[in-house]
Amino acid sequence: MERGDFDPRSAALATELTSGTLRYRLRLDYIIAKFIPRTLDSLDPEVRNVLRLGTYQIGFTRIPEYAACSSSVDLMKRIGLHRAAGFVNGVLRNIARGMDSVEYPDPDRDPVSWISVTESHPAWMVRWSMKRLGFEETLAWCRANNQRPEPTLRVNRLIAEPSDFDPGDFTPCRYAPDGLIYRGGGNPADREEYRMGHYTIQSEASQLVTLAGGAEPGWKMMDGCAGRGGKATYLAELSGDRGEILAVDPYEDKLRALQAQCRRLGLRSIHTIVSDLQELDAIPGSRDLVLLDVPCSGLGTIGREADARWHKTPEMLSELPPLQGQLLDAGAQWVRSGGYLVYTTCSVAPEENERVVENFLSLSGEFAYAETAPTLPGWSRGQMHLLPHVHGTDGAFAAVLRRR
């Protein structure tokens, strides 16, 4: 069955159940393990996942317990595991009766395990955060990551204004001047306004880091890690589509998606090149602004991407910074005297953020922090730190540097 086969309410429920089950997987597994006679890993993957889904419905939604049990049994039968249906039914009914009595790790004796289990984050991630932020702020960060994210949009000011949109379906973002939160139900990409190019789906944090460097009509710019072009198209809009933007990415399919976005938004100032930035012959000093949204751990977006936290490893925080530094070096070659270099990630890790920039500055000698965006949230001395538990956005980082 395709997504389009669901009515909007059913699609929203399916999304909530799937995302919630993935997000709370560790806590669900902890609960289930208390009510089965063997280890969770010994169960068939299908049985394990149906138990997770049923437990999530019982503990985290308003779905009646009998309905959660019944639908789980029906699901087991639909996937051909009739023999396990009775087992699933019995376990879920026991969980419904005994969930409130489950004992979690003691927060005083083992705060890492307590946060890890109750807020469903990998233990290494909690331990890493507590070394930086302490107990209270780590708990707040994890809880913020478990909030249901709302779709956010960026108004294309070349053809629309935020006031043009129905306030019942669209409300202003807290910080981004062109940002709207979509509360109209369904997929905002299915609406006529989207097809007409009136807006782009883009997180508020992504909008803010693009704003950090600014963009002016007539500027020559580069997006050195362009991807599908969320930031490149915003630069085009900010410059009135009267500049020149070189969008570079090694993946041709992503740049084709960017080109399709340009057609939808009516943008003509973006030119694409399929290449790794480090392999592209630089034209030294040719750009007024170079933006680098470098590959990173994505620790700032684990709230938006429900299962992302389970695919992160602590090794990322040591393996990625060398590449990030190399991309920063490559992008810097393109910046003219007095021009701007914007380094950004969707991470909250100092290892990938300020430490990479500080290392670059210590070796370069040609760049310094620029005070371009003091009114943006989380801004201080040429850097912007966006934190989910502080700003209510995805986590993100931007450093704006200027060539002397």
Image (cartoon, rainbow, N blue to C red):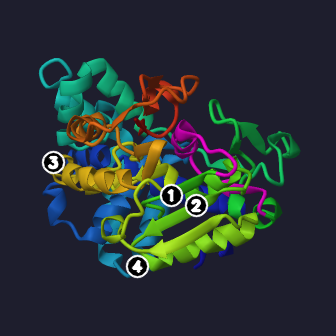
Query: How far apart, in angstroms, are the residues tagged by discs 4 and 1?
Result: 50 Å
For mark 2, give the secondary structure: strand
Q: Residues within 10 Å of mark 3 (few under 14, many from 20)?
A: few
The tag earlier along the polypeptide, 3 or 2, is 2
The location of residue 354, given as percent across then percent down, is 29, 34
Q: Which residue is mark 4?
A: 79
Residue lying at 31% horizontally and 71% vertically, measured from the top left:
279
How many residues crowd mark 2 within 10 Å: few (<14), some (14–19), many (20+)? Answer: many
Instruction: Please report whichever mark, 3 or 1, sits nearer to the chain's N-terminal start.
Output: 1
Q: Amino acid at mark 2?
A: Ile
Which circle, 4 or 3, is nearer the viewer? 3
List the residue tagged with mark 1. 222
Please identify, in this view, whether the residue under mark 3 or under mark 1 is nearer the observer. 1
What residue is disc 2 on? 245
Q: Which residues are magenta?
A: 197-218
Image location (x, y in percent) of residue 99: 34, 38
Q: Secondary structure at mark 1?
A: strand
Name the kind of residue labelled 4 in the image. Answer: Ile
Do residues under tags 4 and 1 come within 8 Å of each other at their CB atoms?
A: no
Give the spatial CA distance, label 2 vs label 4: 51 Å
Residue 400 percent coordinates (x, y):
44, 36
Picture residue at 38% right of the left edge, 82% below the top: 80
